[in-house]
Amino acid sequence: MSESVPTAGGRYAAVVDAAGARVPIYTPEFAADPHRVYREMRDKFGALAPVELAPGVPATLVLGYRTAVRILNDPDRFPADPREWQAGVPADCPVLPMMQWRPNALRNAGIEHARYRRINTAGLAGIDQYGLQGTVERVAVSLINTFCTSGSADLVRDYAFPLAFRVLNHLLGCPVDIAGQAAEGFRAIFEGVGAEQGNKLLVDALLRLTLYKRAHPGDDVTTRMLRHPAELSETEMVHQLATLYGAGIEPQQNLIANTLLLLLVDDRFRGSALGGSLSTRDALDTVLFDDPPMANFCISFPPGPVLLDDYWLPAHQPVVISMAACNTDPAIRDKELAGNRSHLAWGAGPHSCPANSLAYLIAQEAVDQLLDALPEIQLAVPSPELSWRPGPFHRALTALPVVFTPSPPLPEV
């Protein structure tokens, strides 16, 4: 239901009323077929749809590509600072840890955002991409050797997750025990199940990492950030690391797994990726268009009511970019995706992901190593039987079971 209110220019615009109209995007039913839900919302609401991120947590989901680009490049009207919003949110809200204010680039605007982003960019800039490729290869080979003789594996549990986990911890210089606690915390935050406790686990783990790297500096992202002239406090450092963990494990795992699924089920890639004209990079770009690992994110919180596309967006209510829906917007979608990287999977504007080239490199190397080692790999179950983890933000397989001809271990590199 909606009501009309006058604008300053005397026009009338629709205000979406939450009563009975909002679409829940946190349920297993949504996770099973989100693109159907996006189409239905687009048909009913247009470029902006009323949704619930969790029970009783209203938001506006942006489904239109051009509308999303305008929002992402307008940080004055659409800042990323959630403090006014979260003041009215209960502490046990399942999406609060994912959306709450932190002293980092993701959840700040203006001068503070710029300061934090410079520190993160400086930490990432010291990564040797050639050396990173070698790190991914070593990790991939060691993981493949744990299951290549068995003839079966779950590529989420046995490959995509541990690879993303180990590579990120190598880049951050993080000991295994601390990393395990951080990963457990973030998994709860992404799924919105036990998120409050997950947030506590995460913050505790990242404080331990901060103190460890102050005492044991190295050639890693954490040390470079700690040594930045901005002189981060321990609390600030914890929340820079939270951003890196949030981006570097769960989305990276999902990008690898979703790309492997595409290669296993889509004949356009199944043949070409193993010897044809299309590359793994083309498969990655297709996934980043159609099933990006962060499907709904890039959250902003308008400080006042905003008139956009003939809708009034309420003040201090989340505006969430649906990268998955915007990328498949019929108004811009071209059938030919090869070489096209205009997707919004990395965001856009001042909050765009500063590590997208690293994510591409890690995912491409991970996929190529697996396909080179096990070229006859196949799904162990029909693709419709695969399940997706619920949650409003990610596009994440529960498991990716495969079978293949057993092969001897690869030489360790």
Image (cartoon, rainbow, N blue to C red):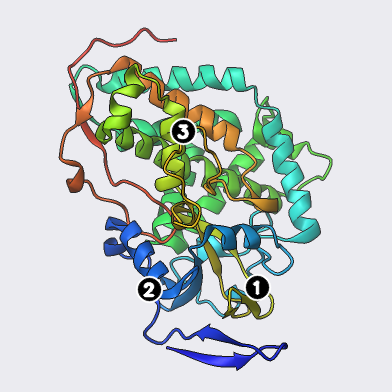
Residue at 38% across, 34% down = 160
Eye-nearest disc, 3 or 2: 3
**Element type where label 3 sits in the image:** loop
| Amino acid at pointer 1 | Pro
The percent coordinates of residue 123 (x first, y second) are 70, 35
User: Along the line of sight, which residue is nearer the eye, 5 or 157?
Assistant: 5
Q: Which residue is mark 2?
A: 23
Q: Amino acid at mark 3?
A: Ala
On the image, the x and y values in percent for residue 354 come to: 65, 41
Q: Nearer the viewer, residue 146 or 63?
A: 63
Q: Earlier in the sequence, mark 3 or mark 2?
A: 2
User: In this figure, which residue is indicated by the disc labeled 1?
Assistant: 302
| Residue 126, picture quadrant | top right
> Which mark sits nearer the N-terminus, 3 or 1?
1
Amino acid type at image mark 2: Val
Q: Secondary structure at mark 2?
A: strand
Residue at 20% across / 42% down in the picture? 383
* Mark number, residue 180: none
52 to the left or right of 84: left
Q: Secondary structure at mark 1?
A: loop
Alpha carbon separation for disc pair 3 and 2: 33 Å
Circle 2 residues within 10 Å: few <14, some 14–19, many ≥20: many
Residue labelled with disc 3: 338
Q: Quadrant of the N terminus?
A: bottom left
